[in-house]
Amino acid sequence: MSPSRSRNQTELDEQDYGPSRTQQRREALAVLALATQLVELPPSRLAKLDLPEDVREEIANVRRISSHIARKRQLAFLAKKMRRHEDAVFDSVRAELGENRERQRQETAAMHRLEALRERLLEDDEAAAALIAEHPAIDRQHLRSLVRQARSERAANKPPRAFREIFQLLKDLQQDDAGGEDEGVDD
């Protein structure tokens, strides 16, 4: 027997028997993960997705169950219902969830950068000078006043009103920068 014959025989076996059991399990776990994501989505986002009606009903059933084991079992039943549909039915849903996840990651990273900048403003006067140099149109007196108030609030263990205002100010600056970059391309 030649080696090519055994390889051809293996290819024929795969064609005859379909995907391996391991591959079937991977696909089933992927559908279960998608079902879990769908159940955890807020109702407003779920309403925007194009889902079959029986899947929507089953998602509502899973959400009503509070017992851990019963919920897990119902979630598995939801995944089973989803596997009965063609993969193409859920392609748009997967794409929408993937895009949203990436956008959420980017927004979260932007918020973390703003929080870090706010902390630098409170710890170091040079950070305020650098921010003012970067954004000459900013109200310097208001920024310095907010920084002083936030420091005193922190020291006196008061509610962080000025601390939040600084964050909002930085967020507005970031949005103005994003809008200005779109307009000032010719410069």
Image (cartoon, helix red, strand yellow):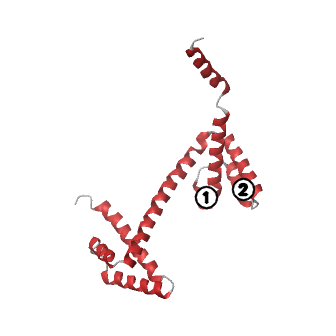
Indicate the secondary structure of the residue bearing disc 1: loop
- For the N terminus, the quadrant is top right
Q: How crowded is the residue under tag 1: few (<14 C-alpha within 10 Å), some, or many (20+)?
A: few
**Of 120 and 61, which appears nearest the observer?**
120
- The residue depicted at 27 percent of the width and 62 percent of the height is 184
Q: Is residue 95 above or below residue 180?
A: above
Please tell me which residue is depicted at 72% across the width and 48% down the height of the picture. 76
Nearest to the observer: residue 183 or residue 104? 104
Residue 103's spot in the image, x, y percent? 47, 57
Residue carrying label 2: 62
Q: Residue furthest top?
A: 1
Location of the C terminus (image quadrant): bottom left
- Residue bearing the label numbered 1: 41
Does residue 160 appear to the left or right of 81 in the view shown? left
Q: Which badge, 2 or 1, comes first in the chain's sequence?
A: 1
Return the x and y of residue 173 as percentages of the image width and height. 36, 71
- Between the residue at mark 2 and the residue at mark 1, the CA separation in whole angstroms equals 12 Å
Q: Closest to the observer: 124 or 70?
A: 124
Q: Secondary structure at mark 2?
A: helix
Question: Would you identify the image quadrant in which residue 71 lies?
Answer: bottom right
Is 92 drawn above or below residue 61 in the view shown? Answer: above
Residue 42 in picture, x, y percent from top left? 61, 61
* Residue at left offset 43%, top offset 79%: 165
Q: Residues within 10 Å of mark 2 (few under 14, many from 20)?
A: many
Amino acid on which the number 1 mark rests in the picture: Leu
Residue 78 placement, left or right of 12: right
- Is residue 104 rendered to the left or right of residue 49? left
Residue 71 appears left or right of 36: right
**Label 2 amino acid?**
Val
Q: Position of residue 176 (x, y in %)?
A: 35, 68
